Image: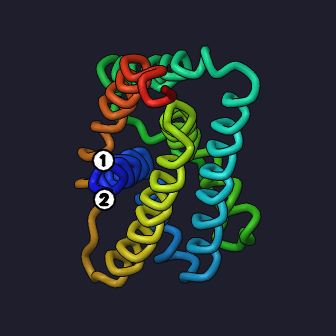
Amino acid sequence: MWDEVAFAASAALAQIVTNLDNLAVLLVLLVTMGAMRPLTGYALSQGLVLGAAMVLAFGTDQAAPEWTGYLGTVPILLGVHGLWHQWWHSETNTQPRLSSSSGILGVTALFLALSLDSFAVMAPLLADSAPGYRLWALAGASSAVAVLCAGAVLLSDATAFSGAWAVRLERLGPVVMILIGAYVLINSGTDLV
C-alpha cells in the first residue's frame, strides 16, 4: 500500500513541477477573467493531457511493451533542451497571450499548449508502470491538478501576489524531466515481471 501511495505522490510532484508555468498563467487569468473560464479550461486541459498519457500507456502495452522504456528518452531530451535554453537564452517571457474575452475552448487550448512537458513526463511514467500503479499515478496527478487550482484561487485573492517564486521554481522543471526520464530508462521492464 505504501508503494502505491509513494508512486502517487511522485506522480503528483511531477505534475506540479511541470505545471508551474500553467500556474503562473492561471493566476493572471484568474485576476483578469474571473474564476469560471480559467479553472474550467485548466482542469479540462489537464484531463485531456492525463487521458492522452494513459491511452499511450495502454497502447504501448499492446503494441510494443519491450520498447516502453525508451519513452524515457523523451523527457530527458526535453529536459536537456530546457536546461540549455535556461543557460544560453535571456529571461524573455515567451508565454502565449490570450484575450480576456476568450471562451473556455480558447483557455483550454492555451493550457494545452503549455502542457506538452506534462505529457512528456506523465506518458513514459504511466507507460513504464504496472497497470495497478497507473491508477495510483493518475489519482496523484489529478489530486495535484486540484491542489494547483485551489492554490491559484487562494493566491489570486491575495492583494500582492508575485510570480517571482514561480519563475524560480520553474527552473526545476527540466531537472525533474531528466530525473523522470532516467527513472523510466533504468526501471524499464522490472515492474512488468
At x 38%, y 45%, the residue is 14
Looking at the picture, which amino acid does disc 2 mark? Gly
Residue 190 to residue 154: above or below:
above
Residue 170: x, y in percent? 32, 43
Count every numbered label the image shows and give the total.
2
At x 40%, y 77%, the residue is 150
Residue 130: x, y in percent? 51, 38
- Give the side of residue 4 with respect to residue 128, left or right: left
Q: Nearer the viewer, residue 1 or 74?
A: 1
Residue 68 to residue 100: above or below:
above
Can residue 20 be seen here? The reply is no
- Give the side of residue 135 with respect to residue 170, left or right: right
Looking at the picture, which amino acid does disc 1 mark? Val
List the residue tagged with mark 1: 167
List the residue tagged with mark 2: 163
Contact check, label 1 and label 2, Cβ < 8 Å:
yes
Residue 97: x, y in percent? 60, 53
- Give the side of residue 161 with respect to residue 115, left or right: left
